[in-house]
Structures are given as C-alpha cells and as structure tokens.
Image: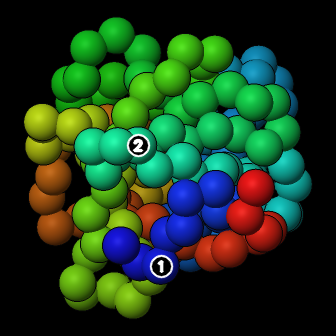
C-alpha cells in the first residue's frame, strides 16, 4: 500500500496540481482544500490502519478526522470532523507512491475540484473514479510513526 505505515504521518500532494497539498483550512478548521505545500501541521495527516484494512486519517494540527459532508456523492465536500471516518486506500499503478482515497464500498474518491485547479483554496470533494490525475495523491512521509 504505497509504503503507508499505520501511525505514519504523511502529506498528500495532488498528482495533477503538483504543489497543491491536502490542507485543513486555517480559515474555518473544517474545509479541506488544495493549498501550496508548506509542511505545516494542517497539511500533516496520521494514517491509522483498522482491523478491516481501511484507514482513519487524522490531522496532526487539530486532531480532527478526514471525513465527508453528508452522503457520498459527486461534489460532496471533504471536511474535518471530530468523528472517525474510514477510508479505503488503493495504490495507483500508473504513478509511484500515488494513492486513491475511496469511501469504502463506493467508487467515490477524493478529488481536487475543477479538474485539479492549483489555485490555493480550491475545494477538495468526492467524485466518482475516472482517469483524472486530480484524483491521485502522492504520499510523502513528514514525520515518524506515532
């Protein structure tokens, strides 16, 4: 699984918008946006493997979990909440160290909106799986295992 270690801390950088990182917005501490990588704690995520093989993904900066707003559907916002939410992670064979993050049991995966718009603040949403590189996230270790 792209060398993900349970308890490992990673940044998730969009494959299409190459400097755009999965970022917990400092503006509302709720929205997940694409933002230029700066190695802040709001861009560091701890992956915690669960017994079923899925992962909890928790913000190092806030302790909130990567979650969704409402039901899994095209355009649903990816947000941070205090409630745990499991993600199914799949390696993307066409890119080294790239993954897709799915809502388990669906084809809905984490997508940098507007076809991977690199403008800081672009919303991160769910969208059905397709060939767009804006749905691929390169993982980079940014800390040890906790």
The front one of 12 and 60 is 60
Task: Please identify the quarter of the rendering in which residue 69 is found.
Answer: top left
The front one of 143 and 72 is 143
Residue plotted at (84% across, 63% down): 39
The front one of 85 and 121 is 85
Q: Residues within 10 Å of mark 2 (few under 14, many from 20)?
A: few
Report the residue marked by disc 2.
Answer: 50
Residue plotted at (55% across, 59% down): 6
Residue plotted at (36% across, 73% down): 1
Q: Mark 2 or mark 1, which is nearer the start of the sequence?
A: 1
Q: Position of residue 55 (x, y in %)?
A: 43, 45
Tell me if residue 26 comes above or below residue 39 in the rendering.
Answer: above
Q: Position of residue 117 (x, y in %)?
A: 49, 56
Q: Position of residue 142 (x, y in %)?
A: 76, 70
Report the disc number at residue 3: 1
Tell me if residue 133 comes above or below residue 51 in the rendering.
Answer: below
Q: Secondary structure at mark 1?
A: loop
Q: Residues within 10 Å of mark 1 (few under 14, many from 20)?
A: few
Give the side of residue 113 with respect to residue 103, left or right. Answer: right
Tell me if residue 17 comes above or below residue 83 in the rendering.
Answer: below
């Amino acid at each position: 699984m792209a060398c993900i270690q349970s308890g490992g801390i990673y940044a998730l950088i969009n494959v299409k918008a190459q400097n755009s990182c999965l970022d917990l917005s400092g503006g509302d501490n709720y929205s997940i946006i694409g933002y230029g990588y700066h190695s802040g704690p709001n861009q560091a995520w701890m992956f915690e493997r669960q017994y079923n093989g899925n992962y909890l993904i928790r913000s190092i900066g806030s302790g909130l979990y990567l979650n969704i707003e409402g039901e899994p559907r095209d355009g649903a916002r990816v947000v941070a909440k205090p409630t745990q939410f499991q993600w199914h992670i799949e390696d993307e064979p066409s890119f080294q160290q790239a993954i897709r993050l799915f809502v388990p049991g669906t084809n809905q995966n984490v997508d940098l909106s507007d076809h991977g718009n690199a403008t800081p603040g672009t919303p991160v949403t769910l969208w059905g799986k397709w060939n767009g590189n804006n749905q691929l996230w390169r993982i980079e270790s940014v800390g040890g295992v906790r």
